[in-house]
Amino acid sequence: MQGENTNQVSQILNLRAKTKALIRDYFLQHQVIEVDTPLLAKYSVTDPYMSQLEANNLQGKSHGFLQTSPEYSMKKLLCHGAGDIYQFDKAFRADESGEHHRTEFTMLEWYRIGWDDQQLMDEVHRIIQLCVGSIERIDISYRDAFIRYLAIDPFTIDERELAEFATKLLGELPGNMLFDNYLTLLFSTKVESQFEANKVTFVYDFPASQAALAKIVETEYGLIGKRFEAYAGGLELANGFDELTEPDTQLKRFQEENDTRRQLGYPQVEIDRQLIRAMERGLPACAGVALGFDRLLMLKWGVNDISRVLPLENLP
Amino acid sequence: MATYTTNDFRPGLKFMLDGEPVAIVENNFVRPGKGQAFAKTKVHYLLTGRMVEKTFKSGESYDVADVMETDMEYLYTDGEFWHFMDPASFEQVAADEKAVGENAKWLKEQESCMVTLFNGTPISITPPNFVVQEVVETDPGLKGDTSGSGGKPATLESGAVVRVPLFVQIGEKIKVDTRSCEYVSRA
């Protein structure tokens, strides 16, 4: 039994090391350089729904925040002429644990200068296939996913209809939900679960209200955020943007998020002015994506529990 | 007062919702990775017995419900209340018909039963999964039939009626599953 478990640990270590080597080799060949940015930094994100971990010493003095993603740091590098960059890093998000989540997890994040979201989606698919072998890809817009799987149009439905629809499908819902909360709840519980198993589904063109750090553009059915997500079956693997580059718009979005925090009674988060200043210097047009490395390994091994690909959770 | 947040949610957790104690039956955390996270649950309203599919916003907090499950000895009924005693403290409680409900038919004096107390008052009772009781009434049926096919109704000493194989006779003790109301074996 002990031998078997030791073997299990070394299998996981090999899986992780070999997959990282494949990816590093790919980026080396494509002139994307590896960087590493601090995991502990002065600023965190304003996203009202992200639960940050602050690092205090034993006297309670703060030394900054464990990063929820390397995005801001990497963008600062991009503003200073770094070119195409990638990194493997640890990301920390409080209150996230379960079959598919850990408070600390491994992320692969990269940026491509001059690319748009469609080009980056193609590369995400290439990298997934490089690691797990040939896997079919399905592309669907956010709007079409709702139409296909739930027969509602998220761009035309009004709030009352949406609330009724969600209640009919999901039972009693919390009071004072924002419009987008209904959409993300339906998407997470009723749309993702219908994505085809053993295929990678790319969802793109999210409502502008869910743009986060993506560029917003106009279409015939409304404003959309140039954001995409990649799913393996119903499991989210990656989230990418055709990046917003305007510092003023970026600052406004951070301020709006702090306003939402105030409305919800959450603490304010100090805006990363360094990022805004760097963007004033100039963030080149680029597309960037974050891919959950542990989840990629789950796909490779066909397992549904993240603990199966984490060596220290498999000690004898 | 002690509280739980949605992060504490797990099956069996009891808390106050709209002034009523509820227990979580199923719980799934929904983390969209963007926007609000949720806990999607099935909750059991302990006073009315209603089961409801309900979604909570992640991070909301609720008061702990003063709900206690304790094994007590059934004493007697006066027609309106069923009286139980804590075998350790000898304290007695009286459960009304709403609390006892259908399960009255399994109650046998001096036998133990799980009583759920909310703020000290019984809100439901749960008989043991298996009980052994004497058959007090059943059709004599066919002696010698041991196949167990068909069966017949039999009334037990506590009043419950269960289907038993034809060979079971008045005065015999049998083991019954109280959850399914099914005969298990001769005891």
Image: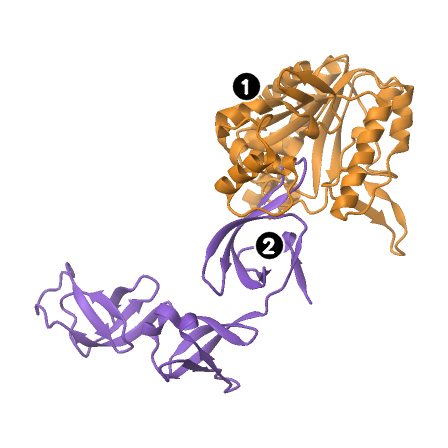
Find residue A116 and report its horizontal and vertical position in percent.
71, 15
Q: Can residue A91 be seen by looking at this rendering?
A: yes
Q: Which residue was labeled with disc 1?
A: A137
Residue beneath the point at 66% across and 42% down: A102
Instruction: Report the front residue among A69 and B107.
Output: B107
The quadrant in which the N terminus of chain B is found is bottom right
Q: Which residue was labeled with disc 2?
A: B9
Which subunit holds the residue at mark 1?
A
Q: Badges 1 and 2: C-beta atoms under 8 Å apart?
A: no
Q: Is residue A17 above or below residue A55?
A: above
Location of residue B152 (image quadrant): bottom left
In the rendered structure, the answer to whether residue B157 lies left or right of residue B52 reads left
The quadrant in which the C terminus of chain B is found is bottom left
Query: Which numbered circle lies on residue A179?
Result: none
- Label 2 is placed on what type of residue? Phe
Alpha-carbon span between mark 1 and mark 2: 36 Å
Local secondary structure at mark 2: loop
Tell me the colour chain B is drawn in.
Answer: purple
Instruction: Report the front residue among A49 and B186.
Output: A49
Tell me the colour chain A is drawn in.
Answer: orange
